[in-house]
Image: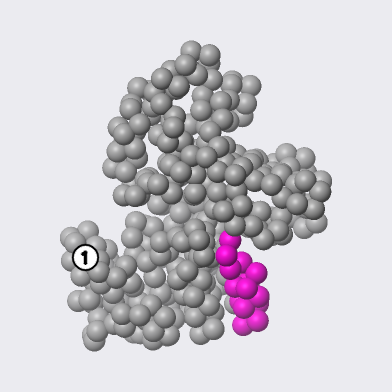
Amino acid sequence: MKTYKLVLLGFGNVGQALARLLLEKRSELQHRYLIRFMVTAVATEPGTQGRALNPNGLDLERALEIMQSDGSLDELSPSPAPIDNLELIRASGADVMFENTPVSYKDGQPAISHIETALENGMHAFTANKGTVVHGYRRLSALAAKHGLKFFFESTVMDGAPVFAAFRQLPAVNLSAIWGVLNSTTNLILSRMEAGDSFDEALRHSQQIGIAETDPSGDIDGWDAAIKLSAMITVLMDHPFTPDLVDRTGIGSITPKMIAEAKAESKRYKLVAHAWKEGEQVKAKVSPELVGPDSVLYNISSTTAIVQFESDVLGKLSLIEKDLGTRTTAYGLLADFINAVSG
């Protein structure tokens, strides 16, 4: 039974949820999958709550306590940990890196460099960072294959739902369209507005329960849905695509009056993501749409998400995940880990 050394790069909400899930599943991992683990490095964003390095293993429970008490992870290191993330990765002596730093819609950096460094130093790399897929999928996948390693990213779209894993088990499927509600924050905001909240009240609630970020513009302006759609186009349609190519409109202009008028007509607003093929080209759009009771999207409310695929052999295939959150994101990362190292 092998003990895998782990690096947790990015220890915000998702990184901490992953740590808690690893601790919760420790016995099951050992007895069911023959996997032991120790964490050798943990890093928060510069200027926040520090970083820790110990190739002989860190106290993960203590790391979580420190984060909850607004302390510094520095106290866990026998000696100061490197400030530079690439140096920290190399010094960790790890077998696996979980990369959960903030996403860059523009170029996927520095997360792409983090994953490149991990792969070049013999580590499997798993991430919830969507920028690594839309800006680095082919390069990182090729690098992983060269070193006999895995680069997995299930949590980038619909968290724990097996969007990418499912299609690894479905050979010779050619997708013609992808469609759905991909962003749980905007879906929750619109659902709360329908129940009577103002936009600001609905946003504040989303932030309080940890669904929306302190800066929610990526969700509200449609960037999150656009980058998730781009990731699926890139991987599942085998067509490199970036968020700036998506015709994008967010929900910022949706008013309570518009919500009320739609409700009077038994309709609802949803932020809909849609990609489709036109000949050899792929087109993509993210925008608010009015849907009625005859639409499958009508009852996709609160933090539920849905994605539907159209293909040449399966017709329409849908995946629905209810109550997305940091725990479901963490599960996608854990599933990638298990699937990679247990064969």
- In this rendering, does residue 278 appear at all? yes
Task: Give the residue drawn at x 46%, y 54%.
Answer: 329
Circle 1 Cα neighbour tier, 10 Å, few/some/many (<14 / 14–19 / ≥20): some
Residue at image x 42%, y 64%? 100
Q: Give the image quarter of residue 119.
A: bottom right
Q: Which residues are magenta?
A: 134-148
Query: Viewer-proximal residue, 62 or 28?
Result: 62
When the figure is inspected, residue 329 is found, relative to residue 67, above or below; the finding is above
Q: Amino acid at mark 1?
A: Ile
Most extreme residue toward the top is 264
Horizontal and vertical percent position of residue 278: 77, 46
**Residue 34 belongs to magenta span:** no
Q: In the image, is residue 27 above or below residue 293?
A: below
| Rendering coords of residue 31 (x, y %) | 48, 67
Does residue 183 appear in the picture of this structure? no
User: Of helix, strand and loop, which mostly describes the magenta segment?
Assistant: helix
Q: Is residue 200 left or right of residue 224?
A: left
Which residue does the numbered mark 1 point to in the structure image? 66
Residue at the location (37% across, 62% down)? 15
In front: 38, or 208? 208
- Which quadrant: the C terminus? bottom right
Query: Which of 238 and 147 lies nearest the eye of the viewer?
Result: 238
